[in-house]
Amino acid sequence: MADAIFVDSDARPTALVGRLLNASCRFFAICAGIMLILMALMSLTSIVGRSLFDKPILGDYELVQIMSAIAVTMSLPFCQMIRGHIIVDFFTVGLPRKVNRVFDVFASLILAVAAFAFTWRIGIGMFDLRENGDASMLLNVPTWWGYAPMVLSFFLLGCTALYTAWVDLTGDRA
Amino acid sequence: MTGIEQGMAIGALMLLLMALRMHIAMAMLVAGSIGYIWIAGSATLLNYMKTAAWARYSIYDLSVVPLFLLMGQFATHGGLSKALFRAGATLIGHWRGGLAMAAVGACAGFGAICGSSLATAATMGQVALPELRNHKYSGRLATAAIAAGGTLGILIPPSVPLVIYAILTEQNIAKLFMAAVIPGIIAMLGYMIVIGIIARVDPNAAPRGEQASFAEKLKAIADTWPVMLIFVAVIGGIYGGFFTPTEAASIGTLATAFVAWRSGGLSRRGFLECVYGTAQATAMIFLILLGADIMNVFLALTQMPAELAKWVVGLGYSPVLILFVIIFIYLVLGCIMDSLSMILLTIPIFFPIIMGMDFWGLDPESKAIWFGILSLMVVEIGLITPPVGLNVFIISSMAKETSMKETFIGIIPFLASDLLRITLIVFVPSIALIALKL
């Protein structure tokens, strides 16, 4: 969906792994939110500087690019934790619950595989970038700095997807 | 196999995976990856994966999307939907059907600071449904009006799907936003007229509210100042070229955060809900973007979109007929898919077809903008059509005493007004385009 409405439930996982993952996902989501607010504050400062003192923040575009990329990726694990990714349930809604659960386990496992594959490839990409010293144009921010949170986020996304698959498999909805 | 056949095969695989409850984003990603390996080999895919996420997520223009989402969250927590509905209710509540019209108008107003349909429907449902119930409105009319009104949230800029459309087709976001304003207002008026007609046919469904005094009206309107100010700053700023969309969204986000904080909506819990809600919606959208990217890279490799466009144009049918076929496909897809996935999957295929044909001698840019507005309006209809009408789901969950079937029946006249408006804009593109010439 292009949009969603979020209602936080007070239910939290009880098992230790679940609690740890849930807390990490929420922590990442909060980091993403703070990153966005910082990004907005920076843009505002730049606009004020530009219009009043003819002095925008140097490299504000680059900073927005880096910050939004980090904020977006850090949001990914949380969405899987609360099962907020969108699926088409129209064709399977009439099937028994058990069958649907098998599909859900399969979907989560595929997401885990994809997330770990991205972790691996982005990780390699990060080392490539560090070696060849790729950096942003104006501020000279090394590009691999932006990659590092991405690697972490995709790794957490993979773990979370494995966890949701396990929860669906064992029927422990907590 | 030809490119078209390869594209069809992978497309079929993707739809199958979607039907089997796989995340939409993952269905695109998996099918797209298989197709990519099929054509270019796995080494190329592994190489592509190194930079794909960064390349997509660090696009400057896209950074506006999470900001608009956060802005919508703050606006919801700032009680702005309530102020808007009160203003509408004091102004026209004493008309026949006036309160339902006020709800639709408030949806439009809220849409001007929120780029999301579901959020608009949900927040307006909370505010307006109890009032409509107290005034003995029929459940069918009340729920249908708000579910339909919610679609204004996306139609009236800012609008997340329009940002995506702009990036996919390399069009100017500011111009697309401007072009959406008049069709959005027409949509609002259309819904109000529908309510007016229903109220006349069945006066019991839509009783009159009380008449408010002049002072009350003035105060209620004054209470909506943050909305007006934010809308003018954001949309005016973008269109006037003072800010980039990202800068405008930054200002809007901070302004709505301030309003929410002033109104006491940003307690610790309220703030966390805003942040979590933003994270969820952002992740959902950007995971789909990642999947759609790989699908579209594959499609480009097969050259299917270009070949298909050449073939369709070569058929020699009238462009309007082809356009209506495309609209029909959107309506069918919209019954089961969400608007963003539809735009991401179909625009790379439909856009070259539209651009290859002549519509009333429009120049390429006008044509691209006009088609963007049209597809936006058509995909939004999917939110209120059965079996999967997310706006209706949301409203139904709030109005337990009205069955979902009742709501879907109530939606029919609103759908008629949607289809009428779409037909109007198909034949009179200047309704959308005139705003660009001002």
Image (spheres, coloured by chain):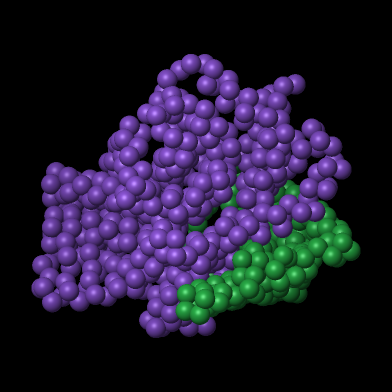
Chain colours: A green, B purple
Q: In this rendering, is residue A110 above or below B357? A: below
Q: Is residue B129 left or right of residue B19?
A: left
Residue B304 falls in which quadrant of the image? top right
Residue B30: % across, % down = 73, 43
Residue ID at (52%, 28%):
B356
Residue A27 falls in which quadrant of the image? bottom right
Camera-side residue: B2 or B230? B230
Q: Is residue B46 left or right of residue A1?
A: right
Camera-side residue: B66 or B169? B169
Residue B155: % across, % down = 39, 51
Residue A145 falls in which quadrant of the image? bottom right
Camera-side residue: A9 or B317? B317
Residue ID at (43%, 39%):
B366
Residue B143 visible in image? no
Residue B32: % across, % down = 71, 40
Q: In this rendering, is residue B93 above or below B270? A: above
Residue ID at (78%, 68%):
A142
Camera-side residue: A126 or B243? B243
Residue B94 visible in image? yes
